[in-house]
Each structure stands twice: as C-alpha cells, then as structure tokens.
Image (cartoon, rainbow, N blue to C red):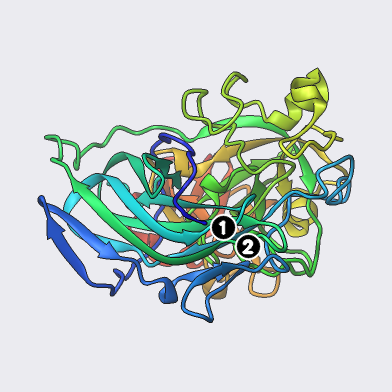
Amino acid sequence: MRTGLRAALLATVTAALVAGAVTPAVAAESTGSGGASWTADLAAGDGTGVDTGSGSVTLDATDAHEAPRDAASPRGAEGGADAPGTGYLTLEPRTLSRPTDQVDSTLDADLPPGSDVTVDVRGRSANGGWTEWIPSTASSPTKSSARLPETTSQVQSRLVLTGTPGAEPVVDGLQQDARPTAVSEGEEDATTETAPLSYSVFATREGLVGGTTANGHVIVERDKFVALPSRRALSPRDTNDYSVKVCASNGRCSFAPVWDIGPWNTRDDYWNPGNIRQNWGDLPQGVPQAQAAYRDGYNGGNDQFGRKALNPAGIDLADGVFWDDLGLKDNATVTVDYLWTGSTKLSKVDTAAADDTGADTGSVEVRSAPSGTAAVVGGAADGAAVPIMCITGAWLQIGPGQYLPVGAVPGATAASACTTAG
C-alpha cells in the first residue's frame, strides 16, 4: 500500500543551542508562491537503523532502535515484546531565501500494515540554537505539515521509520515546501533572557556498554551522555544540539548531550506544558509519565508499550555521568536543567583543546572556584553545550560555583569579565 504520514504533534517550545556552522542541502530548490520547494536528498542523510543502499530508505528491523530499556527493564519484560523498532534518517539543513514558520511535506512511501513514517522538522532559532524537532501532522493521506514555534530562515528534517520484521516501511522520496512568512518587527533582535526549564526527576543508570543509542552512537565504557524519553530532544549523532545540566544531591553536576531516547517511553517530553506535550498532556508539567505510572498507577501503572513501570525514571545517565561526574552509587533523584529551553547562547566543550584533565576521560573537570587546585564538583562532557556566564583570568564560569578552564571551550574568550567569583 502506498500512503502518507500519520498524525503526530502540533507545536513545541522555542529552543536554544549553538551548534556551529551548517551546510545547506544540495538538492534542487525552486520557488513558488514566494516560498521554497525542494526534493530532499535522501542519499545525503545520516541514518541509524535504516538502509539507504538501494537509493530508497528502508527500516532495518534487525538494527532499529528498540523500546527504551535499562538494567531493570529488559525489552519485553512485563509485556511490550513486540514493540516496533525505530530508525532515523537526519537530512542536511537547508538555508532559505525567505523566512518561514511552516514546512509542508509530501512523502512517497510503502507502508505495510503496522508500520509508519513521520517527518520531523526543526528550525534555527534567532540566538543560533535549534527548536525541538516537530513531528509533522497529516493533512491528507499523502501530505503533512510541521508548524514551527518561531520564524526561521534555516530548517532541517528527519525521517522517522517504525515497523517490525516483515513490516518494514520504505521511503522512495520526500518533497518539501516552506511557506513564506513575514518577520515581525523586533523579532530578530529579541533579547529577553529566559532561564532553562528545570525539574527534579528520578535518574537511572543506562549502562548498555557496546549497544547503540537512538542517534547511532556506540556506547563505550564510562560514556558521557544522557537519554530523555522523547525524540523531540534527540541530538543528531556527534552533536550537542540538545544538552542538559544534571545535579545530584551531593552538589556535583554534569553537563552532557542528549544522545538516546528513554527511559521507558519515546513520546514523553514531560518538560513541556500539557498543550504542547506529545502524550499525557493531563499530567503536571515536569512529571514524567513513568513517575506517574509507578507512584500513582497512571495508565494502569504501565509505560506506552504496556510494560509495568518498575521505577519512576525520567532520565537515563550513561556510566561516566552517573559514576564519574555525579559520584552516584545508586539510582537517585536529580535536578535537570534542559539547557536548550533557555534563551542563553551555549558553547561547545572540546576536551582535546582543554588545558585541564579531559582528553582521556571524555570530559573536563568542573571546579568550585577559578583555580586548578579548587575542589572538583562535576564534569562537562566532550561536545556538551554549556552556558558561559563570564570569564575570570583563565577560567569560565558556567554556573554558581562552577568553572571550566578557558581552553575547554574554544571561542568563549569573548565572554564578559566576572565582577565577583561565586
């Protein structure tokens, strides 16, 4: 059967993250009704859990990302054994000649019963970051549209394929159209500072060394990344587009990118308000569905796959974040800042350029004061995004009582001078 997209989600919150230079896609572009139209170059996409060797994009069910799991919840435990696998193909960013706030997609795909394909779209924010990924909403059997939360002149799309062995979807083509829109006066120069959303949630250790994350990263020992239970904040492979600051009750904090989806769910952007949240919008903002299921019997005590929620986790931590940065011995409640939801520009940590420890550990030590002899109070993962508050001598302040050496964040020397240390 040849068909289009199933309905997904309407909108999302504005996001912020500096991700470096991007290259527009090469596929031919035309203009119509003042907008831009192009045929996506599927061969140029970066895929995980998909096969692009034939010129089409086919879900590789044997390598697709399975339902999120951890040591306490192997796939198939307490039900959900037949949950479909998911593959992703992230396409090249595209710079538009005119700003837009809506991208329409026409998908040419074979969808066997039980399979699905969705087009996620995001836009570059005025401060240099990306909005969250917006799953397109179907308007007809063959067309769908993604309404972006702000006007942008640069967009990026991602194909999300789901299915089971014997029912793998195939995408042969994708046509996209960006509807032009006027930029409101003063919009491009908006300077209102907003802090990132922050919530206390239960954290579990992901482990799974040797496995592959949803964005295609192969997990190594003492790895430094986190997983959140929604693909809307999944960073493309080897990028820092979405990062978090995680702090434990012992005062130690870790800055790390979001490279995986989980625990438990894949459509639970619980940090967003209910009118935006993809699923379970009746829950309070900041409450993960797994927490409500485990503690209050919400959804019969089950996650989205019908598995019994064995803990209330809202974030998974890779071993290096869990053990090394935070010094945790067991699963625990932590405070998470979802850094892309704030308006502050973020900068990328580069351990290879650091003049402190980091090259061998995958992170740079965070110090309690601007001194190499100050107490270590956490770590910042290679590639993570951090907010630069100010600079004092050879140190950058990235939070209250949190400092990194200037060399760990190339290009951050333009930060303003700290007036006081703290």
Secondary structure under badge 1? strand
Write the residue at 45% across / 38% down: 341
Residue 222 makes an appearance in the image = yes
Asked which quadrant contains residue 335, the reply is top right
Q: Is residue 95 left or right of residue 394?
A: left
- x%, y% of residue 206? 78, 53
Write the residue at 69% across / 46% down: 262
The amino acid type of the residue labelled 1 equals: Leu
Look at mark 1 in the image and give the residue it sits on: 161
Q: Which of 136/237 is in front? A: 136
Residue 127 makes an appearance in the image = no
Q: Check contact, mark 2 vs mark 1: CB within 8 A.
A: yes
Write the residue at 38% across / 38% down: 14
| Nearest to N terminus: mark 2 or mark 1 | 1
The amino acid type of the residue labelled 2 equals: Glu
Look at mark 2 in the image and give the residue it sits on: 168
Q: Which of 340/291 is in front? A: 291
Q: Is residue 137 left or right of residue 335?
A: left
Q: Which of 360/54 is in front? A: 54
- x%, y% of residue 410? 43, 67
